[in-house]
Image (spheres, rainbow, N blue to C red):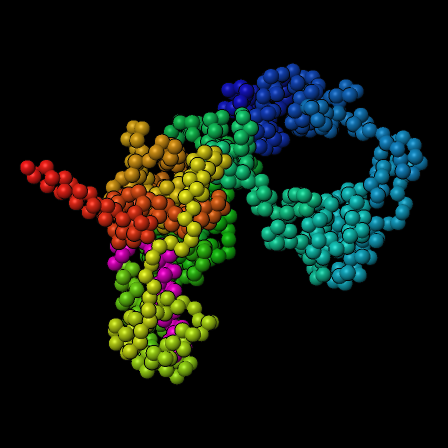
Amino acid sequence: MTGLAEEVVADPVGLVVRLVGNVEKHLPAERVRDIVLTVVRARAGRRSLAQALHDDPSLLRTGQPPAPYCVAKLLMSLHDAGAQDVALPRCGECGRACRYVGSSTGGRWGCSPCFDKPAICAGCHEERRVVSRDRNGEPRCQNCPDTDGDPIRELTELITNLDPALDADAILTALGCATVRPAGQRRLAWAVVARPELLTGAGYEAPTPAALRFIDELVAAGATKVVRPACPRCYGVKALSKLLEGKRICRACFARHAAVPCSGCGAVREPATRDSEGRPLCPNCMIRQPDNLEECVGCRRRMPVANRVCTTTWQLSPRPCQRCVLDQQVRDLLGNATGALRPELAPFREALTSAERPDVAIAWVSRSKARDLLERIGRDERPVTHEVLDELPPGKVLAHLRSVLVATGTLPPRDERLIALEKWIAETVQARTDLAERRILHGYAVWHHMRRLRRRLGEGHATRLQDLNVRCHVTAADSFLTWLNSEGLTLGTCTQPDLERWMADATVSYRDETGHFVRWSVQHRHARGLTYGTLRWTGPQGVIDSEKRWADARRLLNDDTLPTPDRVAGLLLILYAQKIATISQLTVDDVHIDGDTVSITFGTSPVVLPTPLASLVRELVTTRRGKAKIGTPDDVPWLFPGGHPGLPLTDSQIGKRLHRIGIRPKQDRSTALFTLATEVPAAILARMLGVHIKVAVQWQQASAGDWAAYASDVAQRNRDQHNSKAQP
């Protein structure tokens, strides 16, 4: 993306139109522009064409290679449109002007007689011009066609025997749709006859894409035995458009195979291009490269292109404007008979139609589930509320739709995890048929666990682990009540031997959680005379590996191939013992940048970061970007924005990303806490890291770094020194 003329970068199509107009007087500029846009569709190709004509405008008059093949395509298309002044492309071998030339390497192009090299014919064994190849791939001259059977007839017999639902006409029609040229049809027939299993699931090993098109046409024609092949990597039945290691795989699997960390943002994605030094760039970073910025027709600044409106700028496609199509689809779904939208839906419509990628928004809106939900919202005359959405079929589409509505201000924020937990508890309690058991389980789940959870959350939202903790305890209580019922017992009639009999069963689960329920039941007089001991935490159970901790820290600080968000999250866990749930909820307001100093607040006191980590945090604050394509607000506060608009990465997502780079959150955090507890007093540890003072004291005692005893010893020594000085 360097070495290009300024005009080539700014307006390659306009430059080509102007240079062609200097030579060709028989075609209007608008017609030339249409031809250029059709011949070369990609921005890189248009710049290549513009640069070639900028460097050598005489190509339009001579048509003489070497030059990029797009120049020859332009000359051929101009002549097909009636051009008279520009030259036809000339063969690089014989110099003859041709209405069609083929391409070769090194910017060469030429006519068929010059490019078709003679070979030894498999029939007459003479060196002749090759006009076809036999079923073994051997060359054949015009006088020696392959007469070894009729491959089309063999193919027809094979398929009709395999699948009686298909007749010869349907097979021939499918073959013609798969490949038009007779030579291609013969090659396809030979391949399938040689390997019939291609039709019954092994199509991913097809030698040519035409075989996959043939299978699709047969299935569309009503085949019952012929099946579309699944991707050999993800096992999904989808288009297999890429070839990897001799097998045809889907586009998504190829993208994952080709994914590398972007040199710009660190995201692990398939590169869209490479910079001047050969480093990979993802699509988002590519459009933000200085060479790819364009002047906005609104603010006149050179910025990444967000959209091209058909009435304002050239849309580089013969299709209707995607943004206009999207706007009309949204109006049809959400509006009334006249297309008018209710006022409260206006921000939501604006979020959809102003998406950075209108094609992505169109694809989402076109999904049957999304269309159904949007139509229901549009038809419902009630104001859009969370309660109205709760009446719709649940699922990922509704969750995403709700997050967009919240991000755009149409709905207020709501703790969806807490709401789902409350619904699950209500269903679990109602599932119990005994009224007494239902009352006990309701008291334990709602008045004990949920009340404590709400008090702990305050204005915050529940984390995955908090949700899981409540579910495990309620499930344990429900399972124990079910066991009592199966034994003809109740909590009131259960004795200590009965409880010990349950404890002796090796198949039971949730033992600690059940013990908590038993103790709660005794405390609230639902049970009598039952005891269930609990184990006091005495320290981490895993290996405390300080050497691994520092090795991981050095790797995360120095390995530029890892994504910046993963590096920062890993370092906050390894160096500062932060839970991934805490890391998930960090915002840019928690980061304080004062000149060269960068600090971050986990608890009540900010922590000044060392220079290498400070640089990474600065970069993250600047480049942070979520995966949401629709409805993302401009002022996202999260340090780690996630895939839903306006929401951060979840703790489970961060955990998975850390696992992929070799970080084990639970064990590595234990190592960090253990090490810090030996170095820092509990009170300071609690203030700096945001942990409870009791937790800090327990870790300090477990690590034998008892700072309370140390402080007492220091105070005693100071008193002894003072007393000794006071004595005469």
The quadrant in which the C terminus is found is: top left
Quick one: 212 or 468, which is closer to the camera? Answer: 468
Point out the residue furthest to the right here. Answer: 124
Q: Is residue 232 left or right of residue 461?
A: right
Number of marks in the image? 0
Q: Is residue 725 left or right of residue 545?
A: left
Q: Residue 525 location in percent, x, y?
A: 25, 76
Q: Residue at x 50, y 51 (%)?
A: 366
Whether residue 80 is visible to the viewer of this picture, yes or no, is yes
Q: Point out the stretch of residues depicted in magenta.
A: 455-484
**Does residue 51 lie above or below 264 as drawn?**
above
Q: In which quadrant of the rendered view does residue 395 lie? A: bottom left
Point out the residue furthest to the bottom here. Answer: 488
The quadrant in which the N terminus is found is: top right
Q: Residue 285 location in percent, x, y?
A: 48, 34
Q: Residue at x 25, y 41 (%)?
A: 605
Q: Is residue 561 left or right of residue 511?
A: right
Secondary structure character of the magenta stretch overall: helix
Q: In which quadrant of the rendered view does residue 130 lie? A: top right
Residue 306 falls within the magenta-colored stretch: no
Residue 463 falls within the magenta-colored stretch: yes
Q: Residue at x 64, y 45 (%)?
A: 241
Q: Residue 351 location in percent, x, y?
A: 39, 45
Q: Residue 665 location in percent, x, y?
A: 42, 49
Whether residue 217 is visible to the viewer of this picture, yes or no, is no
Point out the residue furthest to the left here. Answer: 728
Quick one: 131 or 372, which is closer to the camera? Answer: 131
